[in-house]
Image (cartoon, rainbow, N blue to C red):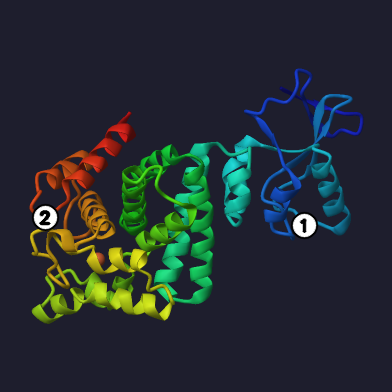
Amino acid sequence: MAIKENMLGVKEIDCSDGISTEDYNQIDPNILDCFPRQQYPVNLFHWKEDIRVLSPVYVAGRGLDRHLRIKVRDLSEKGLLFFSRNQIEQYTECVACNLDTALEDPNLTWEEKAGLFVNELNRRQGALYAHHLGGHLEDLQRAVGSLCVYLIQDPQRIARLVKDVHADLSVERRRINASIIALAIYVELNKGEISLELLETVALGFLLYDIGMSRLSPLMLGKPQQLTTSERRTMREHPNAGVELLTKLNLARQEIVEPVIQHHERLNGTGYPNKLKGESIGQLGRIAAVADSYCAMITDCAYRTCIPPINAAAELVTNERKYDQVICRTLVRFLQTVQK
Ligand SMILES: [Fe+2]
C-alpha cells in the first residue's frame, strides 16, 4: 500500500488491491463506545471505496468536537472506519475496559485476548487486594464473568493463558500467575463437567486465594531479615484472615473459602493453619497449594533466585507426601504444551 497525495494535499493510503486486515482493521460502534469521549487513542481512517483509499479522519490524542464525533460514529456505523494495526497496543488498552466487547472483537486474535485478560485480571485483583471494597469486587467479578465465557466456549483456550503467565514471571505477577495456573488445572481436571456459574465461582476463589496476605503489614513482608517467631505466627494466620475478609465481602461460599483456607495445607499434615491431612483437603485446596508453591519457585524475588518452570514442576512431582500427584502431573502436561 502506497501513500499518495489527493488534490487538497491530504496524504491518503492507496488500497487499490483492497484493505489488508493485517495492516488495517475496522472499528465498529461498540468499540467506539470503549474509547474516551474527549480523545481517541488511535488514528482513524475513512475507507473511500469508490476511489479505494484510506483517508485520515482523526489523529490520535487530538481534541474532539461534536461535529467530528458525529462524523466518526456515522462512518463506524456504515463500516467505513478503520485504524492501523501498528496501534493495536493503544487500541487493546482501551477495549480492555469492556471485556465483553473485547471478547467479541474480531480485531483481536485469541492470543491478544488472552494477554488482555491476564493484564486486566491482574489490575483488578490488585485493586481489590489493596482496598477490599465492593466496587473493586464488582470490577473483578465482571472480568471473571467475561473470562469464564471465553473459557466455556473453548476450554483449550486456558493453555494460551498459561503461556501468557510464563511470559512474565516478575514478583508483581506472582499472585495473578498462581491464580491462572490454578484455574487452568481445575479446567483441565473437570473438563465437560463445569457449568458457567460454577466456573465463575471457582475462578473468583482462585483469584482471592491469598487475599489474607493483604492484611499483613507491608513492613513485615518486605523486611530482608528472617521473620521472628511471633511474626511467623502472624504470617501463618493469613488464610484465616482471608476467610474473615470473604465473610465481610459476602463471599463465604465453599468453593471460594476452600482455596483461601487450604492453600498452605499439605497432604502429610505439615501445612497450616489447620494441619489438615489427605482427604480432608479438598480438590480446590490441593490445586491452590500446587499453584502457589509452583509460582513461589519460578518467581524471582529479593531473598532467593527462581528456578526454571520445568524444574519447579519436577520438584513438586517428586514430593508426593505433600502434593497431589494427579494435580502435579496436570501442571507438567501444561508446561509441555507451553514450551511447544
Ligand atoms: Fe498464602
Give the left or right position of residue 162, taking residue 317 as reference. Answer: right
Up-down relation of residue 1 to residue 9 (above or below): above
Confirm whether residue 90 shows in the render.
no
Which residue is depicted at the point 54% across and 53% down?
146
Position of 155 relative to 247 (above/below)? above
- Rendered residue at 54%/61% (across/down): 142
Q: Residue at x 48, y 39 (%)?
A: 154
Please tell me how crowded label 2 is: few (under 14), some (14-19), or many (20+) other residues with Cα within 10 Å. many
Q: Residue furthest front?
A: 193
Which residue was labeled with disc 2?
A: 322
Q: Secondary structure at mark 1?
A: loop
- Where ligand 1 lies, by image quadrant? bottom left
Mark 1 lies on residue: 63
Q: Tell me which label, 1 or 2, sits earlier in the chain.
A: 1
What is the distance, in whole Å, between disc 1 and disc 2 at their CAs? 59 Å
Reply above or below: 130 against 92: below
Q: Amino acid at mark 1?
A: Gly
Q: Which quadrant holds residue 337? A: top left
- Residue in front for this viewpoint, 193 or 158: 193
In the figure, is residue 258 to the left or right of 203? left
Q: Quadrant of the N terminus?
A: top right
286 horizontally vs 178: left or right: left
Q: Residue 267 — which label?
A: none
Query: In the structure shown, which secondary structural element does the residue marked by tag 2 occupy?
Result: loop
Find residue 4 and report its horizontal and vertical position in percent.
Answer: 80, 25
Q: Assess mark 1: CB under 8 A from ligand 1?
A: no
Which kind of residue does numbered mark 2 sit on? Lys
Between 11 and 92, the one lying in front of the other is 92
Query: Does residue 334 appear in the picture of this structure?
Result: yes
171 or 329, nearer to the observer: 329
